[in-house]
Image (spheres, helix red, strand yellow):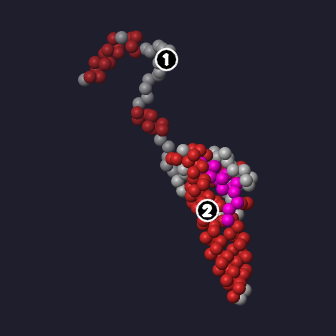
Amino acid sequence: MFWSKKKSLDQGHPAAASSDARPGAKNRPTPRRRDQEAANKRPLVVADRKAARGTDKVRRKEALARQREAMVTGDDAHLPARDKGPERRYLRDYVDARWSVGEIMLPVMLLVLLLSLVRTTWALTTVFVLVYGLIIVAVIDAVLMWRRVKAKIAAKFGPTKVPAGGAMYAVMRAFQIRPTRMPKPQVKRGSFPA
């Protein structure tokens, strides 16, 4: 009914049927929706699963290699999400620039373990004092360090830019021995970030 009128109109006007290339125009007919959807369809499961698994494995290997390299060099583009951002970098640099009690805990605990094998009263008393005393001092040092670095991050980046989970991030980094920290320290001791 309606389309017959359109056909008769198109046949009556030969200029409407032939389209000349106009500048700024699309100059092609709009594709039908069915054709566009068919062109965009891709299978959920590829036909050659073995080849897909191989390419996926290679892609994952390359991504992990870039991430490992970034952990050594400090390249922010390829770091994992928990380490990205200028606030996290500032936090890492601040922790790496200072001496903390937490990083000497592991070597002292090894000494305490050896002392605990000696079954004398003085050795057991020394073990008790060393373990609990060192833990208390390390916790106090970590709390004071976090308060200082939190204030510095708020002053530099703004009070809303203090990273969520930053306290645990800083404390866990402070409790690791410096050479084993990942991402690797990018600053020397004593050179605090500006």
Q: Earlier in the sequence, mark 2 or mark 1?
A: 1
Q: What residue is shown with label 2?
A: 142
Residue 190: percent from left, percent from top: 73, 53
Residue for point 48% across, 36% down? 39
Helix, strand or loop at label 2? It is: helix
- What secondary structure do most residues of the magenta stretch adopt? helix
Q: Is residue 99 magenta?
A: yes
Q: Relative to residue 30, is residue 11 depicted above or below? A: above
Q: Residue at x 40, y 11 (%)?
A: 15
Quarter of the figure with the C terminus: top right
Quarter of the picture holding the N terminus: top left
Badge 1 amino acid: Gly
Task: Point out the frontmost of discs 2 and 1.
Answer: 2
Q: Magenta region: which residues?
A: 87-101
Quickly name the residue at label 1.
24
Work out whether residue 25 or residue 9 is closer to the camera in this orientation and state it. 25
Tell me if residue 98 can be seen: yes
Location of residue 132 with respect to 47 vertically, above or below: below
Assess whether residue 20 is covered by the magenta stretch. Answer: no
Q: Is residue 129 above or below residue 7?
A: below
Spot occupied by residue 48 in the image (x, y as percentages of width and height) = 57, 50
Secondary element at tag 1: loop
Q: Position of residue 156 (x, y in %)?
A: 59, 44
Circle 1 packing at 10 Å, graded few (<14), some (14-19), many (20+), is few
Disc 2 marks a residue whose amino acid type is Ala
Q: Mark 2, residues whose alpha carbon is within 10 Å: few (<14), some, or many (≥20)?
A: many
Q: Residue furthest left?
A: 1
* Location of residue 181 by image quarter: bottom right
